[in-house]
Structures are given as C-alpha cells and as structure tokens.
Amino acid sequence: MGAIDRFRVVGGARLAGEVSVSGAKNSALKLMAASLLAAGKTTIRNVPDIADVDIMADLLTRLGCIVVRGADLVTIDVPEVPGHRADYDLVRKMRASINVLGPLVARVGMAEVALPGGDAIGSRGLDFHIRGLESLGAKAHNEHGYVIAKAPNGLTGAEIVLDFPSVGATENLMTAAVLAKGVTTIDNAAREPDLVDLGNFLISMGAKIEGLGTPLITITGVAKMHPTDHATIADRIVTGTWAFAAAMTQGDITINGARAQDLEIPLEKLTAAGAIVTSNENSIRVRMDSRPKAIDVSTLPYPGFPTDLQPMVITLNAIATGDAIVTENVFEGRFMFVNELIRLGAQITIDGHHAAITGVEKLSSAPVVATDIRAGAGLVLAGLVSDGITFIEDGYHIDRGYPDFATQLRALGADVTREL
Ligand code: UD1
C-alpha cells in the first residue's frame, strides 16, 4: 500500500445526537449470493454502501450476472446458466464469497470456490459446509486451493446435524437445500437475525422453509425459484457499536432504524454497566451519565452476546470502574487487537480464550493498527476515550463494515477524520 489509510481520532468528545443505521452487511452479502438461485432480475434494498458489496458485485459479474448499484439498492440480473467459479483473489478479500457455494451446486450442479484460508480472527474451516453438501448428495474434493463440488443430477434432501451452529454453513446448506428433491432438516442450525433475513428472502423467491430463528430448520425442496424484491434488515452489529460508543463516551445517542429485538443481551449488558437504554419499534436510545461499570461477557452464537461486538465490550471495560472477564467462545484468534489496546494503556491480560481487564480512567493515545473490521471499530472507540490523537492504521478494514463512519461520528460531535 504505502499511501495513507487511517482514521485520525481526537479523544475526549461526548457523543450525542441521532444516527441512522443502514442495512446489515452480513445479510445483504448473503442475499446477493442467494439471488443466483433464480434466473431474472432480483432487487435488494437497504444495501449498505461498503466495499464488501462491491466485491460481491464483482464476483456475481464474473459469474455472468448483470449487477447495477443504485443509491441504497442493488439489482442483479441472473442468467439462465451462471458460471461456477469463485476465484481466490475475491475469496481472500472477503470470506462471504463462499456463500455462492450452496446456490451454485443447487442451480448449476457444480461449484469451484477458493478455500478462504486463515484470517485475522482464526482458522475458520469449511468442513461443515462440505460435509453438509455431501449429505445432500454432492461430491466434493479439494484441488489446487479450491473446493470443487459437483451434483450433476441435483441434490437430495437429508438430515443434517451441525457440530456447531455455524452461520456460514447453515446459510450454504439452506441455499442448497431449497432446490433439492425432498425434505432437508438442519439441526443445531444458526439462529442469527441475518440468517432469518436470508430465509425470508428465499421464501419470497418461492422456497419452502420452516423453523427460521430456531435450532431446527426444515426445508422442502422446490423445482424452481423466481426473482424477488426484498429489503435487508438493519445492521445489528453497527447498531451495537453505536450503543457501546454512547456508553463509553458518557454520551446520549438515538439510533434510528435499529432493531432492539436483535440485541437483547448486549443492551442488557449496557444496562448493567450503568447505561439508560430505551427502545421502540424503530429506534434505540442509549444514555450514560457516569463512567461505565465493568461487565463480564461471554460471546456465544445468537442469541448470545455477538463475537462481533467483543472488541467493543473489551474497550468499554478498559475504561470502566472495576475488573471484568471477557470470554471468546466463537473465534479463537480474536484477541489479536488486544495488543493494540494495550498500546493505548489498557490493562489486559489474556489467558487462553479469557481476557482479564482492569479499567483505567482514560486511555493514552498512540498509533495502532486495525486487524479486522470489528477490531478496527473498537480501536476508533478506544481513540474517543484516549487523551490525545489516536491514529488507526489500515482503515480500509473499518470501511468494509461501517459506511461513512467518520462522517457519522462527526455528526455526533467527535473529531474524527478518514485520512486517505
Ligand atoms: C459469520 C459472520 C461473522 C460473525 C460470525 C459469528 C459473515 C460474513 N460473517 O461468520 O461476522 O463473527 O458469523 O457470528 O456473516 N467453523 C468450523 N467449520 C466450518 C464452519 C465454521 O469449524 O465449516 C467454526 C469457525 O472456525 C468458528 C465457528 O465455527 O470458530 C463459527 O463460525 P461461523 O458461524 O461459520 O462464522 P462465519 O459464518 O464465518
């Protein structure tokens, strides 16, 4: 790179005002991939303006689709016979590229998808995805860094039990099973709201799915699906990031377009930290009048505390009164950013998948590096509660998940600049 790519954060501001939350990255990308299931033009609304949407658009274009982006919508015109290869250059940039695996095997009878390899938050295998597709009758093997899955005669419904409620595996298997012959059950399925959104999108395309949002999803295969028009749900992780930002800066933020029902445990934790949290159907307000109290948290699959908000809760604890333990149960490599937080003066010791944190009154600004989307956002919040100017390098990670983050922070009263 070489060029400047960082966030400049001046510490000390109290964030106050209103902010609007956009559509969920982790839903919109999956809806885009699932549009491959039907020939013709699908419209997806409330799509966030982030770099990952461009990467998925690029991938779908390479598969023969015509993808057009409007202000906050994407239309995808899917050909009768799409291509079947997701290249390594795209998969390594964005792991969600593997979400084309299920739809391609189901619709084209063949997929070649690059193996994603490790990333900054852990090893993240594909074994559940592949074993599940094999249960549905596909033949799969690895060759030259690609998983090659074939089902020339179509897929057949099966009973699948996941070892762990993996979001990506549940999505790939659900989007494969919708066109399989007969009934598929996915037991120990993921229950994330983004996955429910994907299920509802598939139903609007003609799929038959029951049990969304529960650990047992039942899919009755249909012969054909049709294009649809669907609006993405609000991003619960971006919403949660604003909620933590309000609590940490002793601020008062009203988050419009938010869904409180997707964030029950994080909002309860913020209440335990001393925040006043109120919500209605369409917004959440978080107000904090004192230094937060330390809160113990264990990350778990939904409805547990989301691993994607783990950097935010560690950062809150870093400036809280008292001691806390944060336990990471979803991704083993996710404490990498803690070393950056320690550079800012946080008192944290790591023991396996536990982080023990003793709050200090203020962090101390320093240059730090964003290692992934959520770690990056956590470090921006840390900069807000530091005593000077904090530079967060490799800011492109943050752009992948937070549209106009610096602009939105400025509107709430912070002095934050995106330097490119
Ligand atoms: C998705 C989200 C990510 C979020 C995560 C957990 C997207 C693009 N990403 O990631 O932001 O943090 O859910 O909520 O939606 N695993 C295996 N084998 C597999 C699949 C998963 O061992 O075949 C393991 C992973 O290594 C990890 C755990 O299962 O330890 C959970 O991963 P998973 O739920 O699949 O996360 P993603 O779908 O990759």
Image: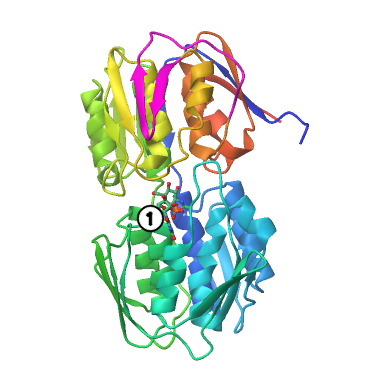
Which residue appears at 45% of the width and 49% of the height?
23
Coordinates of residue 157 in the picture (x, y in percent) = 34, 83
Q: Residue furthest right?
A: 2
Which residue appears at 29% of the width and 22% of the height?
324
Which residue appears at 41% of the width and 19% of the height?
348
Give the answer, above or below, for where 155 lies relative to 103: below
Give the answer, above or below, for where 220 lies relative to 56: below
Asked if ligand 1 lies within 8 A of label 1, the reply is yes
Coordinates of residue 111 in the picture (x, y in percent) = 58, 75
Where's the C terminus, which quadrant? top right
Coordinates of residue 113 in the picture (x, y in percent) = 60, 67
189 sits to left or right of 92: left
Residue 402 in the magenta stretch? The answer is no
For residue 187, what is the image quadrant? bottom left
Q: Give the magenta range.
A: 346-369
Q: Residue furthest front?
A: 352
Q: Please say whether residue 184 is visible from this viewpoint.
A: yes
Q: How is the image coloured?
A: rainbow
The residue that mark 1 highlights is 194
Give the answer, above or below, for where 11 lies relative to 35: above
For residue 264, what is the image quadrant? top left
Coordinates of residue 300 in the picture (x, y in percent) = 30, 44
Where's the N terminus, which quadrant? top right
The foreground one among 196 and 293 is: 293
The foreground one among 61 and 144 is: 144
Mark 1 residue type: Asp
Secondary structure under tag 1 reads: helix
